Image (cartoon, helix red, strand yellow):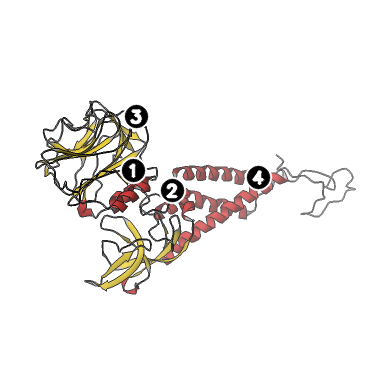
Amino acid sequence: MTDSRPARIARETALTIGALLGVICLLAGIANVVFDVKPLVFRSGSMAPAIDTGDLAFSRTIPASSVETGDIVSVLTSGGERVTHRVVEVAPGNDGAYLLTLQGDANDSPDEEVYTVTEVPRVLFHVPHAGYVIAWLTSRTALVLLGLVGVGLVVLVMRGTGSGTPGPGPGTSGGAGSGGKRRAPGRRRHGDRVAARSVPRRRLLIGAVLGTLVLGGAPAWAAWVDNNTATATFTANKYFTCDAAVLGSAPVASRFFYWKLDEGALNLGAADSSGGTNRGGSYNGGVAYGAAKACARDTGSAVTLNGSSGYVSSGPLVAAVAGPNTFTVSIWFKTTTAGGKLIGFGSARTGQSGQYDRHIYMTNSGALSFGVYTGATQTITSAGPYNDNAWHQAVASLSSAGMKFYIDGVAVPGSLPGVTTGENYSGWWRVGYDNVNAWPSQPSNYFFTGTVDEAAVYTAALSDADIAAGYAAGR
């Protein structure tokens, strides 16, 4: 089979590009193994303008004794979240450890947590916007495409590995007009044709390097990306994902529970991802799993409640607690149907509670209300409506500063600074259903109909800035 010159050029160009990418991947692997150089994708703008969201930094682990004020280092918080900030204070600790106080260049104050380390990755340099490339390489789409490209290039290699022999032609022995002369081996005239070209060993080497890239390189890059998978939709925000926002808005001790609602088709209960005491939830009634998440940057899924029997309750092993007077409750939701309770506290773990407040519910008009009972109902109600089939986030808090209510990161007018306590009883937190009887503009259906995601409760009142950043992280 004749191989045209354009086809040969295209094949060799593709294989050369594959080889270059493979060499880059191998060099990166060598740098990682031999020199302990690791990349870090920046998923927030907390280090701007020095390092922006979406930049790719390279770090090398050094002893904590070598850390100096002004270094940019990467540490893990007590909740397991990676933070890469600038060192503002170094103090000796116990047993050879050091205490590091860090602060993001874009943050107004140092991190709340002081990090105890014996060694720490220090940023050497960074490449602007290169995180987009890493983000793409670690996506499922990229891995599939790389596999297909690899298969295609292997086919190209195999097409060129034939060992065809030059056919008879002018000037060869026995050919017309040869005059009985034999041309010197290795030489042919302009008009000679070759059925197939043998492939030099270098091309086979190219194929091998390409295989290294496709089969080993992409997963290696994926292993180097930080805790939350990066995407190409970076924004300059304190948190990159909703998950990071939930975990970063408060220390572990203040996270009462965090239900990601990621269980998919496996009804194993709603896992508690708060990092603190395990307070998992139970799915009840008509719950559909595997819906698309509220926050496109997060992995996992959401759950859809059928509006007649589906809801999420605290698990059977979760003990009742006294109704908190300092808390923040947060949930994402999407619906086309008005009415129902989104999240709240009640005296019954399942079924309908006899005492119920500290809740967010939707009225029949699609507005949202946050309510606390003090002997009388105290509510903050939005204008709405929010049954528009779009994702929204509702956040409410109670503390010594009073009642506050936020929708999509913005405070709802009408905060109640004089309301600082709720009803005195013990109970459990619920999502998607509970009693709303006798509350202002009570819905006709207490079950919420729609999709819910990222339900969290804290034993602290989050700041306005963290609430706004938490909403922006998901969008």
> For the point 25% across and 51% down, which residue is it?
462
Q: Distance between the residues labelled 3 and 4?
A: 63 Å
Q: Is mark 2 on a helix, strand or loop?
A: loop
Identify the secondary structure beneath mark 3. loop
- Mark drawn on residue 408: 1
Left or right: 344, with 209 as reference point: left
Kind of residue sitting beneath label 2: Thr
Q: In which quarter of the image is the C terminus?
A: top left
Q: Where is residue 229 in the image (x, y as percent from the top left)?
A: 39, 49
Mark sitting earlier along the chain (1/2): 2
Lower position in the chain sequence, tag 1 or tag 3: 3
Earlier in the chain: of badge 3 and badge 4, it is 4
Q: Report if the CB atoms under discs 1 and 3 are less than 8 Å apart.
A: no
Q: Which of marks 2 and 3 is in front?
A: 3
Compared across the picture, whether 375 is left or right of 305 comes to left
Q: Nearer the viewer, mark 4 or mark 2?
A: 2
Picture coordinates of residue 299, whole percent (x, y): 36, 43
Return the mark for residue 162.
4
Instruction: Identify the mark nearer the N-term, 4 or 2.
Output: 4
Indicate the amino acid at tag 4: Gly
Q: Which mark is residue 423?
A: none
Q: Can residue 365 be seen in this view?
A: yes
Q: What residue type is labelled 3?
A: Thr
Q: Residues within 10 Å of mark 3 (few under 14, many from 20)?
A: some
Label 4 CA crowd tier, 10 Å (few <14, some 14–19, many 20+): some
Q: Mark on residue 336?
A: 3
Q: Distance between the residues labelled 1 and 3?
A: 17 Å
Q: Residues within 10 Å of mark 1 (few under 14, many from 20)?
A: some
Could you give the CA–CA distance between mark 1 and mark 2, rounded to whole angstroms? 22 Å
Task: Give the left or right position of residue 121, taking residue 361 as reference.
Answer: right
209 to the left or right of 53 = right
- The residue drawn where x is 68% and y is 48% is 9
